[in-house]
Amino acid sequence: MGFLKSLGVKRKDKSAAAAASAAAANAERRWRKTAVPVLYQSIRIDAVHYCEREEILAERRKRRSFLNRNAEPEDTARARVRLLCRALRDDTLGLGSLLLLLKTPYMTRETCKGDLARIVAVAPNLRYADFPDGFFTGDPSCATLRQEVEQRCLDLRKMSYSHGAEKALEDVAGGYLWHNLEVLDLSGLAVDPTTVRFALGSLRKLHTLNVKDMPSFSDEIFEPNHQFPPFPHLSTLHLENTPAVTIRAMQALLADPQTARTLTNLSLSGTAVHPSELHLILAGATSLRHFSIIELVTTPFPHTNVPPLQSRSLRTLHYEITAAPGASYTAGTAAYYSYLTTSLLAAGLPNLRKLREPAKSVPQQQPPALHRVVRVRLPARCTYGKLQPHALAQGDGVAATEPAGEAEAAAWADGAVARAGGVY
């Protein structure tokens, strides 16, 4: 902002930007119109802001009576949530409509559910917010908060549903909630595939879908059906522990030309997609840049002529195949990694720049033709990519276990706070 630059404040310094904006709003009336939206667009509440006045105010709060000289300190973050709630609800200028992002500490949002409900009631344009865990699992203690969010905050961009929130997902399938939703996380839900399909079909702007621990999530959700609404055009899809998803689902997803051009990030872990079928995915996803597969195999790699992996758009490949416990001795993983090496040497992935693989899967000596590829050696893993407790300490590689959709949302949130500088 121009007035921040005139005060010599860098936009990356969030605390200084917030302090400068508040001071400017009080010092110059002509700056107030610009400073107020900056302050209230993105609000992050922390217990400590590392302000020099914190110690001064804490000292003043102490009771200097003869009987009680050091009263118990108050919950600073909770007090700030209450101050924010009062400021937004008592305001007559529409400050609540400026709020787009609200971040709060974990314990604060768990203990201030009523205050959060009162805040979202006056923030109709809210897009991103931190809610209590019970909000995503259908906890009755969060019923009032969920009711306020569903009625007031119709412009939310990210939402999660975990085990216990099946009824809430059915409300989304009705087609009247959150038409601008962009990121959706589903975890541990016991819900019919038809309900999931209707819910996804009602979210026309959805571009990131993360599904975890859902045995009922099957090919039926992806297959075209004139009785169902169209499947959204995703750019990011993460599937973890969804054993009912086969290659048919991926082919049905990529049969849509727009989805084939839009999908750039795909992650499969614990699905029924066999590594020998990956060439079908890469052939259909013409814009795929990041692909990850983490699977347990019980059968040997097929000896039939499997085409090599080919993709001109792929930049990052995470390939981790492990023999399932109790599998026969013929179900070794050497043939699976030989197939990967053959595909690399065949120049089918000319733009590949990073390859994540187990440390013992390939020889340390890399062929000269693959010097452009950065090979990241992954530490040992157990079932479905969960790191062992000692893996990070003893391993010599780096493993990205966090879904890219969540990482991108967190990066957007931090960037929004940095841009706006709103720290309450």
Image (spheres, rainbow, N blue to C red):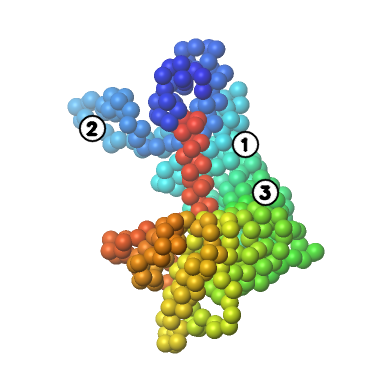
Q: Is residue 286 visible?
A: yes
Comparing 342 with 167, the one in front is: 342
* Labels 1, 2: front one: 1
- Please tell me which residue is depicted at 53% across the width and 17% down the height of the picture: 32
Q: Position of residue 370 (x, y in %)?
A: 44, 61
- Please tell me which residue is depicted at 55% across the width and 12% down the height of the picture: 30
Q: Are marks 1 and 2 in contact (CB under 8 Å)?
A: no
Residue annotated with mark 1: 125
Circle 1 packing at 10 Å, graded few (<14), some (14-19), many (20+), is some
Q: Which three-letter amino acid code belongs to the residue tagged 2?
A: Asn
Circle 2 packing at 10 Å, graded few (<14), some (14-19), many (20+), is few
Report the Cα–Cα distance between label 1 and label 2. Answer: 42 Å
Q: Is residue 173 above or below residue 240?
A: above
- Please tell me which residue is depicted at 58% across the width and 56% down the height of the picture: 313
Q: Is residue 217 above or below residue 331?
A: above
Q: Is residue 401 visible?
A: no
Question: Residue 223 occupies which quadrant of the picture?
Answer: bottom right
Q: Which three-letter amino acid code belongs to the residue tagged 1?
A: Asn
Residue annotated with mark 3: 205
Residue annotated with mark 2: 70
Report the Cα–Cα distance between label 2 and label 3. Answer: 54 Å
- Please tell me which residue is depicted at 59% across the width and 51% down the height of the picture: 183
Instruction: Assign a secondary structure to mark 1.
Output: loop
